[in-house]
Image: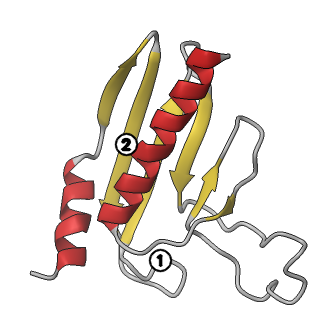
Amino acid sequence: MKKEETGIGTLIDLHDQIIDQGNGYWIKIEAWRVEPTRFVPHGVRYSLTLHEPYGRRILGYDNAHAVKPPKKFKYAGTRLAYDHKHRHVSDKGVPYAFQDAYQLLSDFFAEVDQVLKEIQTS
């Protein structure tokens, strides 16, 4: 089994997990296999989210919808990214460069740690 497939298996195994982060913050992980397409070439749909005590999402990584590239990339509009992240409640998403499921999990949990640290120090 290839490393990427093992990583996707690990991500799938985490489906429906709720992980307490203390002080009312929590993570929800959803992931399931889909047929690979040009929009989801890795064959997995996912949503990794960090929530504040009242349930609002304050960070999320997912591939549920396309996001437009930033305006500074004037000619990049032909390819819409499906893998993306939301950095705050009202963020419509910025592209995320999906490499493999292990990197996705690593990037997400590193950013969770960063967000929670920022909340503690504010």
Amino acid under disc 1: Val
As drawn, 77 above or below 44: below
The residue where tag 1 is placed is: 40
The reply, left or right, for residue 28 in relation to residue 62 is: left
The reply, left or right, for residue 118 in relation to residue 50 is: right
| Residue at image location 53% in from the left, 52% down from the top | 61
Q: Please name whichever residue, 57 or 21, is drawn nearer the observer in this view of the structure.
A: 21
| Residue at image location 27% in from the left, 56% down from the top | 11
Q: Position of residue 52 (x, y in %)?
A: 56, 20
Which type of secondary structure does the marked residue at label 1 adopt? loop
Q: CA distance from mark 2 to mark 1?
A: 18 Å
Amino acid under disc 2: Ile
Which type of secondary structure does the marked residue at label 2 adopt? strand
Q: Position of residue 91 (x, y in %)?
A: 75, 46
Near mark 2 (Cα within 10 A), the count class, few <14, some 14-19 or many ≥20, is many
Near mark 1 (Cα within 10 A), the count class, few <14, some 14-19 or many ≥20, is some
The residue where tag 2 is placed is: 29
Q: Position of residue 92 (x, y in %)?
A: 75, 51
The reply, left or right, for residue 109 in relation to residue 89 is: left
Q: Quadrant of residue 118?
A: top right
| Residue at image location 36% in from the left, 79% down from the top | 35
